[in-house]
Image: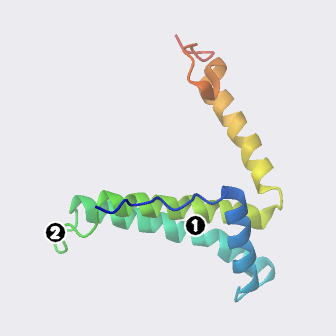
Amino acid sequence: MTEQRTPPTPDLWAAIDDLWTWLDANRAHGGDTGLVLRMLKLTEEVGEVAQAVIGATGQNPRKGVTHTWEDVQGELCDVVITALVALRTLTPDAEGVFAGHLARVTARSLGSRGASGGVDTPPGLP
């Protein structure tokens, strides 16, 4: 019985920067057009999530079940990667911008519980 090994996880932000560098070096359009197209790529990826969900649930009677929930997971990962590359396209400090925004959303949504999962009730909720 051979043991399957999980490949090492790349550093998220180093991988995003590498992908951004590769995409920037191989882009068909620069300037504002290239920027807009990079942002629109996110919409394409979200559409692929929708297609996978429809396929996983068999909602198209003509096609039946064409995807799995693992396919949906992969498509969601593509959305996250594409969004982070788009953010890196807008700022070299994508990691800092994302961390700051995540902290604000977490504080707003979870209040004093924070990301640690405490039991305090956020302000404004009973």
Identify whether 26 is placed above or below 15: below
Q: How many marks?
A: 2
Residue in front for this viewpoint, 116 or 61: 116
Mark-to-mark CA distance, 2 and 1: 28 Å
The N terminus appears in which quarter of the rendering? bottom left
Instruction: Give the residue at x 81% y 80%.
Output: 31
Question: Which comes before the other along the chain, label 2 or label 1?
Answer: 1
Left or right of 84, for residue 76:
left
Identify whether 116 is placed above or below 73: above
- Where residue 92 appears, as percent x and y from the top left, is 83, 61
Circle 1 packing at 10 Å, graded few (<14), some (14-19), many (20+), is: many
Q: Are marks 2 and 1 in contact (CB under 8 Å)?
A: no
As drawn, which residue projects farthest toward the bottom?
A: 28
- Where residue 119 appears, as percent x and y from the top left, is 54, 14
Circle 2 residue: 61
As drawn, which residue projects farthest toward the top?
A: 126
**Render colour scheme:** rainbow
Instruction: Give the residue at x 56% y 59%.
Output: 8
Mark 1: which amino acid? Leu
Determine the image quadrant of residue 85: bottom right
Circle 2 packing at 10 Å, graded few (<14), some (14-19), many (20+), is: few
Circle 1 residue: 42
- Where residue 52 appears, as percent x and y from the top left, is 35, 65
Instruction: Give the residue at x 75% y 75%.
Output: 21
Badge 1 element: helix
Mark 2: which amino acid? Pro
Badge 2 element: loop
Left or right of 79, for residue 2:
left
Identify whether 87 is placed above or below 40: above
